[in-house]
Image: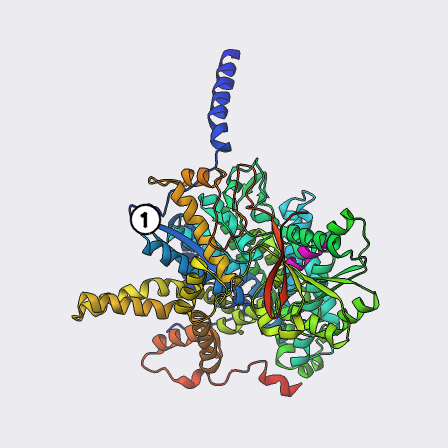
Amino acid sequence: MTKTFKALGLAVGALALTHLPAAAQTKVTNQGISADEIVIGTHQDLSGPIKVWGVPVSNGMKMAVEEINAAGGIQGRKIKMILEDSGYDPKRAVLASQKMVERDKVFAMVGPMGSPTVLAAQDVLFDAGVLQLFPLTAAEFTFKFDPAKPQERLKFNNLLPYVESTRAALKHMIEWKGFKKPCVMHQDDEYGKNVLDGFNQQLVAMKIQPASITSYKRGVSDFSAQVAKMKADGCDLVVLGTVIRETIGAMGEAKKLGWDVTFLGATPTNVLEVPTLGKEAVEGLYAASGFEIPYEDTAKGKVKDWLANYKKMFGSDANTQAIIGYNAVMTFAHYANKAGKDLTGQKMLDSLESGDKFLDIFSSPPTKFSKTDHLANTITQVQQIKNGRWVLVKEGLMF
Amino acid sequence: MRFIFKTDYEDDIRLFPHSGYVWSYGTLLLLLAIAPFVLSSYLMSQLVFVCIYATVGVGLLILTGFTGQASLGHAAFLAIGAYTTAYLQQYNVPFPVYFLAAGLLTGVVGALVGFPALRLQGIYLVIATISFAFIVEEILARWESVTHGNEGMRVKTLTLLGTAVPRDSPAFYFLCLGVLILTIVGSLNLLRSPTGRAFVAIRDSETAARSMGVNVALYKVKSFAISAAITGMAGCLYAHKLSFISPEMFTLQLSIEFIIVILIGGTFSLHGAVLGAIFLVMIDPFLTYLKDDMPGIIANVAAAFGASKATASNIQSNVAAFASANGLKGAIYGVIIMLFVLFEPLGLYGRWLKIKLFFQLFPLYKRATFKRQKIYVKSERNR
């Protein structure tokens, strides 16, 4: 009797042992890699509320794919990119991801768009062992992972997170100009909340009291109440957790009231549309940013060619969004190339985690990942609009 | 053509009027039961969404289709169910408890919405329900200690009887299917009871209903509560299916989707909710499928008609470029809905009944059979 139990215990123990390492191992798929092709997928908002992001990002990605394929592909393999429209609807993002994983057999999901869409769909990818690379959301869940859950190791992000970049830029501004009464105006959504968190955390760290905190609902176009309140509260620096229209609206309102105050925008304000559409209203705006925005007449070498190519392909000027999309595919290509001729999922994961640096053509800070850190970097710049152009003020900032 | 000779009241309210129903629904049930073992998980995922949307559709039909009270606030009811789930799950409350709690809480909220709605009709009621949805969205964004505000909440994998039920597993599908079937059967039962008849009476004419002794206020509130409770339970499943919820998911657009479900499906029968949900969930994957495969098919057809290889591949790339144009899918979708509203106000189920009758009566079918339908919107002048 006892012998049988012992044997049973031993058998169970042995079985458990054989299963242990298997459970701790990250499963990475090899699907989508053939002798002459690598299939990657992405879902973008091409018809919903944030298509001003989705369309140029997908353009940038298409351009990168064409460039790589024209140059002979990755170790002889051409990239085939499957693009689906999620319309910023999490249901459609889940279905699109399942379709790409099962029907199109994508090897990796590169640059998917939006927080609710990416988060609702990401388990579909992890269950199938598909890498989720460089999504277009700076939320924490796209790079922080639990080491106890091996499938979570499949996520990597190279976007500058809002909390960290806001903190770094705010720190620099306060130390540089000695602001005493900083305020914040933020969009009432997940992005705005991140900016608010960064603002609050930095002020606590620097032992400064916020003078005023205001918010607005996405889609509104009147900011007179918020600006009047901040003026009444005596703010000397206004941090903007806004996007394009709201940045222009808030600064225009301040100009109208004759209020001379310094504005500092979070990274989404650092796009070409702000000075182009805002004109004089946004002169002097500071913004946190990840890389310098190239201009056609001052760009040199590769960047100049790139801008010209983009215009030729899509008939419009390239913007920050297009650069981010382009970089997402280029970063993928860099690490896939490094993984070698006999590319597999495991080799791709090792290559990403190897700590090898990727440098883009736009002289952004280097992208680098490790086994424990799946966020490229948090190095922030501060730029300012001078004469209708973004000009670099300070780079290499951390908080 | 079969003629059913009804001899007593029981015959009139029977769920299955004759054996044909048992056979056809039995076959459907069998097909649904073997589906997860035959279909890919992509299709299964669509079926799960169909079940969830159909459940909401049934809830909305009770309110809009049978009681005649329009609502553009059902996304808010779904949100309350979903957030109840995410909140209670943190405290390790078992699934059956929070599932029922989601329904109960949403039902109570639905009743509270029903009270002010008593004095409102038609477009004013729609506006009131929209404002209710905005209030809920605002609360979800502000009440950070409970809802985590705009950060959203992760929903853990469902556990039932100690075993995990992942959202892509057959078990989860059967759960959603079971909830849908129970909802449909429960609603059918409700609608053939005095309560259901009171709902329909209110829809057709409030004045007439009141003069017949129907307590209009009570039944309107009841209808709101039942409709909301069903939507709340669907919200629980929705939260599990998406595994993440945030306030920006439960917008006016989602409420409009639910209205589309019943408009496309047909507002006069519960079949409409299911057919509408199938349409709404599956049209997008279907258009994606066309986008992927049509160019190749067209090129093959061209080649069969004698086009050269170069022309065929040229055609293929041109069609592919056209098919993947941004917003084309949205436009097709919109056109389909417009055509439905214009030419088939009875929805998909109405079309099905017409086709069925056409074959049953062949060659004696006459179009006028369906002409005189008293639809609740038209009866508003009788109030």
Task: Give the chain of mark 1.
Answer: A
- In the shown orientation, is residue A290 left or right of residue B130? left
| B66 to A368, vertically: above or below | below
Q: Quadrant of residue B143?
A: bottom right
The answer to whether any part of residue B215 appears in the image is no
- In the shown orientation, is residue A69 left or right of residue A278? left
Q: Residues within 10 Å of mark 1 (few under 14, many from 20)?
A: many
Question: Amino acid under label 1?
Answer: Arg
| B76 to A360, vertically: above or below | below
> What residue lies at 73% left-to-right and 50% top-to-bottom?
A202
Dividing the image into 4 quarters, which one contains the C terminus of chain B? Answer: bottom right
The answer to whether any part of residue B295 appears in the image is yes
Dividing the image into 4 quarters, which one contains the N terminus of chain B? Answer: bottom left
- Badge 1 marks a residue whose secondary structure is loop
| A308 to B372, vertically: above or below | above
Provide residue B212's location: percent of width, then percent of height.
69, 80
Provide residue A346's location: percent of width, then percent of height.
42, 38
State yes or no: residue B122 in magenta: no
Provide residue A309's location: percent of width, then percent of height.
40, 64
Provide residue A272's location: percent of width, then percent of height.
56, 67
| Residue occupied by mark 1 | A77
- In the shown orientation, is residue A174 left or right of residue B253? right
State yes or no: residue A198 in magenta: yes
Chief secondary structure of the magenta span?
Answer: helix
* Total count of labels: 1
Given the current orientation, which residue lies at the most extreme bottom position? B381
Magenta region:
A190-199
> What residue lies at 42% left-to-right and 72% top-to-bottom?
B352
